Image (cartoon, rainbow, N blue to C red):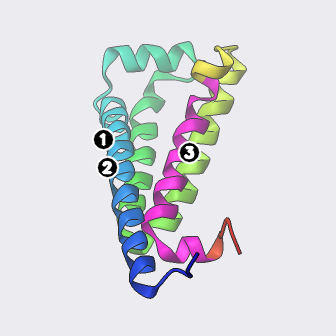
Amino acid sequence: MTAPTATTARTNSRIAARIGWVLTGLIAIFLIIDGVSKLLNVDDVKNATVELGLRDEMTPVIGIVLLVSLALYLVPRTAFLGAVLLTGYLGGAVLTNWRVDKPLFSTVLFAVYVGIVVWAALYLREPKVRAVMPFVR
């Protein structure tokens, strides 16, 4: 078996970046829909917010926080900060759903699944993140 060449490494890096951007796009679509529905104060979303024990006037503010965090995540220069903010936002979703006894694997941990994809996408698209958090040394 031969050692990987620089060309192979660059090709693998480009493929990883493309996969990362595709995952980022999918997450962005999902979170934009979620954030905009909160920002527009859609009745079903407002009712779900109240069902979770939050005041209905909080819904647009939650949408703004989500969309600002997502915008930071989508800009390469601020992507790491955006990922950290999205992680905090998703952690709040976990606690909020857990507190009202929602189903564990389908509802409570859904935000964890989204967070894993957020970080996996950033890891794949950003070589600096791979350098900081290598899986293999």
Q: CA distance from mark 1 to mark 3?
A: 14 Å
- Determine which residue is flagged by label 2: 25
Task: State which region is magenta.
Answer: 108-131
- Packing grade of label 1 (10 A; few <14, some 14-19, many >=20) is few
Q: What secondary structure is found at the residue carrying circle 1? A: helix
Query: Which residue is outermost to the bottom?
Result: 6
Question: Which three-letter amino acid code belongs to the residue tagged 2?
Answer: Gly
Q: Given the image, on which type of amino acid does mark 1 rest?
A: Ile
Q: Which quarter of the rendered picture does the N terminus lie within?
A: bottom right
Residue drawn at x 30%, y 36% is 36
- Which of disc 3 and disc 2 is earlier in sequence? 2
The quarter of the displayed image where residue 76 is located: bottom left
Q: Are marks 1 and 2 in contact (CB under 8 Å)?
A: yes
Q: Identity of the amino acid at label 3?
A: Gly
Kindly identify which residue carries mark 3. 115
User: In the image, is residue 72 above or below residue 9?
Assistant: above
| Label located before the other in sequence (1 or 3) | 1
**Which residue occupies 38% across, 65% down?**
17
Crowding near pointer 2: few (<14 within 10 Å), some, many (20+)?
A: some
**In the image: residue 76, left or right of residue 122:** left
Q: Nearer the viewer, residue 50 or 6?
A: 6
Where 88 sits versus 2, above or below? above
Position of the C terminus, as image quadrant, is bottom right
Q: Tag 3: Cα neighbours inside 10 Å, few (<14), some, or many (≥20)?
A: many
* Residue 29 badge: 1
The residue drawn where x is 42% and y is 77% is: 8
